[in-house]
Image: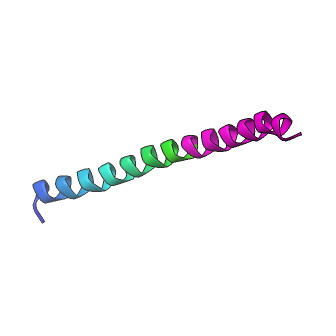
Amino acid sequence: MTITEFFVIWAVLLGVFFLGYITGQKFGAYRLHDEMLKAGLENISEPEKK
């Protein structure tokens, strides 16, 4: 294995890990935001039903 291959493999691994971490954080934030929106919409629509 050459030094270039070694660095390429590490760059790919770090890139995949970093992208996975960023997308995980984003999806987590979106999921939380979605839950908050759902809760907010439920609270808003409840008085209209009654």
Residue plotted at (37% across, 48% down): 19
Q: How is the image coloured?
A: rainbow
Q: Quadrant of the N terminus?
A: bottom left
In front: 6, or 18? Answer: 18
Quadrant of the image occupied by residue 8: bottom left
Q: Is residue 32 left or right of residue 40?
A: left
Estimate the x, y position of residue 18 in percent, counting from the top left. 38, 47
Q: Is residue 6 above or below residue 21?
A: below
Q: Is residue 5 magenta?
A: no
Residue plotted at (18% across, 58% down): 6
Q: Residue furthest bottom?
A: 1
Q: Is residue 44 left or right of residue 47?
A: left
The main secondary structure of the magenta stretch is helix
Estimate the x, y position of residue 28 in percent, counting from the top left. 56, 46
Estimate the x, y position of residue 7 in percent, counting from the top left. 19, 52
Q: Quadrant of the C terminus?
A: top right
In front: 32, or 18? Answer: 32
Quadrant of the image occupied by residue 44: top right
Q: Is residue 31 magenta?
A: yes
Q: Give the residues in magenta.
A: 29-50
In front: 36, or 28? Answer: 36
Q: Is residue 12 above or below residue 38?
A: below
